[in-house]
Image: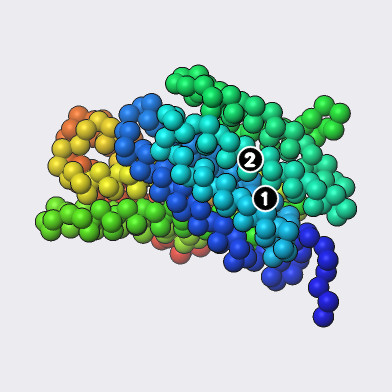
Amino acid sequence: MTRSLSLLRGRGSHDSGKVGMVELFFDLVFVFAVTQLSHSLLANLTALGAVHVGLLLVAVWWVWIFTSWVTNWLDPERIPIRIGLFVLMVAGLLLSVSIPHAFTDRGLLFAGAFVFMQVARSAFAMWLVRTESPSLARNFQRILIWMLLSGVFWIAGGVLEGNLRLACWALALAIELVSPSLFFWVPGLGASTLDDWNVEGNHMAERCGLFVIIALGESLLVTGATFAQLSWSIAGLAAFVVAVLGSIAMWWIYFDSGAERAHERIAHASDPGRHARLAYTYIHVLMIAGVIVSAVADELVLMHPGHATNGAVITIMAGPFLFLLGCALFKWVMSDRPLPPFSHLGGMGLLLMLLPAALAQVFSALILGALTTLILIIVAGWEAVSLSRGPLPNV
């Protein structure tokens, strides 16, 4: 049988939404990026450090999710797209290498790698589809113009230092974050439409699920590596068990039912682009942030199970809260629920109730980590038991 010469990903067949091996290979770069982000936060556990790492995290997510959109439209098994992904991998490695020093002496490297990935990918995709789909080509033209605009501020920030760099990069990231919500409107070119964003829902859902796995894998990697370096003790073993159970609970909350139900919804939606933009492009970054912060918290508890500083307390509490917030919003917008899941709202409420006592140093780091893990387990069990009784509007 002859294979189609089109570079576009197929639609409608069983294999059309399958994630290719080259995409999984590409993701290995972002395993490294996630590791760099967690280590950077651990090394600078301050309010400013959290802002820096938060900005870098969203930037890393943004370049990854935009690449996932492109491989949703274009077939990564085709040689030109495959070569393009390999080029992006090299730039992604440079981006990842620069993360720990992005706000010191490697700012221009980070900005240059990021802008190259965003601009070159958009320009390359626009050229590849020039004879395939006029509407898709015009869509990439609009995206390219927005990436060039934000790129000016990324590069300017890389040249500047201190708060000026932070301000420039915050503006650049804001430009990129707002662009999809404006449908990449450009004077003279107009705006894209949801019809232009006709995504393969199976592929998008699987890609984002795999990134959650990447983040959870980093959490387990940090736990195992840190525990291996510790002297054997009851407190260390307890911290190890707490950390592993926390990662399992987060996996359960996301993958047990919510991810599959969302997968089915976007796969059969008449407007999959709307779901892909809101639920997968925007909301998923909250869950990724929650897992990364939780990984940092696990290392803190393993290394210092006794007294917890205020920075450690906020880290231990923030990880589960961000994760539950992201999951609650994700499951809400990908269902017909009138409200976010009660189980998730209840879990966030318990975390907030725990916060005053935690800040008052009532608990050791180990006890506080155990309590937050217990809350995650309660949420997972609450949702699982509720769903076993039949479909409910909120669980």
Q: Are marks 2 and 1 in contact (CB under 8 Å)?
A: no
Q: CA distance from mark 2 to mark 1?
A: 17 Å
Residue at 72% in and 63% down = 79
Residue 369 screen position, x and y as percent: 25, 46
Quarter that holds the N terminus: bottom right
Residue 158 screen position, x and y as percent: 53, 28
| Residue identified by numbered label 1 | 69
Residue that protrudes farthest toward the top in the picture: 164
Q: Is residue 3 visible?
A: yes
Question: Looking at the image, is mark 2 or mark 1 earlier in the sequence?
Answer: 1
Residue 269 screen position, x and y as percent: 71, 55
Residue at 69% in and 28% down = 149
* Quarter of the figure with residue 25: bottom right
* Quarter of the figure with residue 48: top left
Q: Is residue 72 left or right of residue 128?
A: left
Q: Is residue 146 above or below residue 304?
A: above
- Name the mark nearer the viewer: 2 or 1: 2
Q: How many marks?
A: 2
Residue 174 screen position, x and y as percent: 59, 29
Label 1 sits on a secondary structure element that is helix
Label 2 sits on a secondary structure element that is helix
For the residue pair 30 and 213, the one nearer the viewer reads as: 30
For the residue pair 287 and 330, the one nearer the viewer reads as: 287
Residue at 55% in and 47% down = 92
User: In the image, what residue type sits under mark 1?
Assistant: Trp
User: In the image, what residue type sits under mark 2?
Assistant: Phe
| Residue identified by numbered label 2 | 116
Residue that protrudes farthest toward the left in the picture: 233
